[in-house]
Image (tube, rainbow, N blue to C red):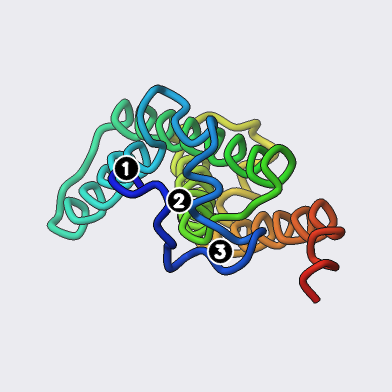
Amino acid sequence: MLTNPGAALSCDVNPFISCASVMKSAQASMFGFPNPIIGLGAFVAPIAIGVAILAGAKFAKWFWRLFMVGVTLGFIFVIYLFITSTFVLGVLCPYCMLAWVAMISIFWATFLWSAAEGVIEVPTRTFGFFMRWSGSSWVFSLATEVLAVVIIFFALWEDWLTIF
């Protein structure tokens, strides 16, 4: 896109599912550089931490709290991007949606584990809930993603009708 703004991208499926439309918008460079650079940098941390854990590393509670802050900020950023894409631009980017799914999954897995392990403090009466569900973060991820699909379906209903 930088060298050839008129290029057709493989992820441009139709007028409503299009990477190019999203990448050309003002919202695609929130901090003065392309948002995908944030994603590339942000996903390195969970991968590196996962590899370190597999290698036997143990991290202090302060580290996990800092990681939880970063994951939460990433989750909030993804919600912002979802809202912008769905309600402001009215266009969905397949690669962006893949990043949304990944960040939602990372958030719920990290949040539930952090609560169950006492990394973040939760009310005592909810501790059992977090202990019970910490190994099933996929349920929360799936519920969040289904909610996003339902919102997209209704928000872009008129656009879908023009395609079919």
| Residue topped by disc 1 | 2
Which residue in the protein does label 2 denote?
106
- Residue drawn at x 61%, y 39% is 79
Left or right relative to 44: residue 85:
right
Q: Position of residue 138 (x, y in %)?
A: 56, 64
Closer mark to the observer between disc 2 and disc 1: 1
Specify which label sits upstream in the sequence, 3 or 1: 1
Q: Amino acid at mark 2?
A: Ile
Q: Is residue 33 above or below residue 44?
A: above
Q: Position of residue 3 (x, y in %)?
A: 28, 45
Which residue is rendered at x = 26% and y = 52% of the image? 47
User: At 43% from the left edge and 68% from the top edge, which residue is drawn?
Assistant: 10
The Cα atoms of the two marked residues, 2 and 3, are separated by 10 Å
Label 2 neighbourhood size at 10 Å, few (<14), some (14-19), many (20+)?
many
Q: Secondary structure at mark 3?
A: helix
Q: Nearer the viewer, mark 3 or mark 1?
A: 1
- Residue type pointed to by label 3: Trp
Tell me what residue is drawn at x 61 percent, y 61 percent. Answer: 17
Q: In the image, what residue type sits under mark 1?
A: Leu
Q: What element does badge 2 sit on? A: helix
Numbered circle sitting on residue 138: 3
Q: State the SS at label 1.
A: loop
Q: Quadrant of residue 80?
A: top right
* Residue farthest to the top, as pictured: 31
Q: From this viewpoint, which residue is outermost toward the left? A: 55
The quarter of the image holding the C terminus is bottom right
